[in-house]
Amino acid sequence: MSEIFENDILELEDAELEVVSGGKDILKVRKGEVNIRAGAGKDYPVIAIMCRGDELLNLYEKKKDSRGKTWMKVRAVNQNGWVRSDLVK
């Protein structure tokens, strides 16, 4: 799965981005299978499933759901989605 970012990284090099200091550009899935969702919360549909060790591009946006869980916006499989922050490193 790590190859999915080659095109994304090329596109991002031309964009003007503000990177949060101390942030991590690439996140890795920590657990067996992790759902990437269309929004920040379990009520949103699953748009991709990633496996342990797969890489996600950190888009540096965070939101809390109604249960207080923190979700991070990421780029995976050529689309943007949301993953719970405790499932990536």
Image (cartoon, rainbow, N blue to C red):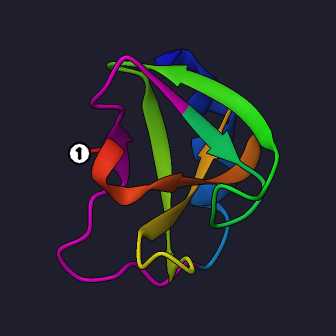
Q: Does the magenta stretch include residue 31?
A: yes
Q: Nearer the viewer, residue 68 or 82?
A: 68
**For the residue carrying disc 1, how many other residues have a C-alpha within 10 Å: few (<14), some (14-19), or many (20+)?**
some
In this figure, which residue is indicated by the disc labeled 1?
Answer: 89
Q: Against 81, is 54 above or below?
A: above
Q: What kind of element bears circle 1?
A: loop
Residue 2 colored magenta? Answer: no
Q: Which residue occupies 63% across, 41% down? A: 36
| 43 or 48: nearer the viewer | 43
Residue 30 figure quarter: top left
Q: In this view, does 54 lie to the left or right of 13?
A: left
Q: Give left or right: position of 38 versus 49.
A: right
Q: How many marks?
A: 1
Residue at x-position 70% and y-position 48%: 37
Looking at the figure, which quarter contains the C terminus?
Answer: top left
**Above or below, 7 relative to 20:** above
> In this view of the protein, can residue 78 be seen by the observer?
no
- Magenta stretch mostly in which secondary structure? loop
- Tell me where residue 58 appears, x and y as whole percent: 46, 57
List x then y, in percent, for residue 77.
70, 30
Q: Determine the image quadrant of residue 21.
A: bottom left
Residue 68 vs 31, above or below: the answer is below
**Residues rendered magenta in the picture:** 17-34
Q: What residue type is labelled 1?
A: Lys
Which residue sits at x=59%, y=29%? 6
Residue 28 in sight in this render: yes
User: Who is closer to the viewer here, 79 or 83?
Assistant: 83
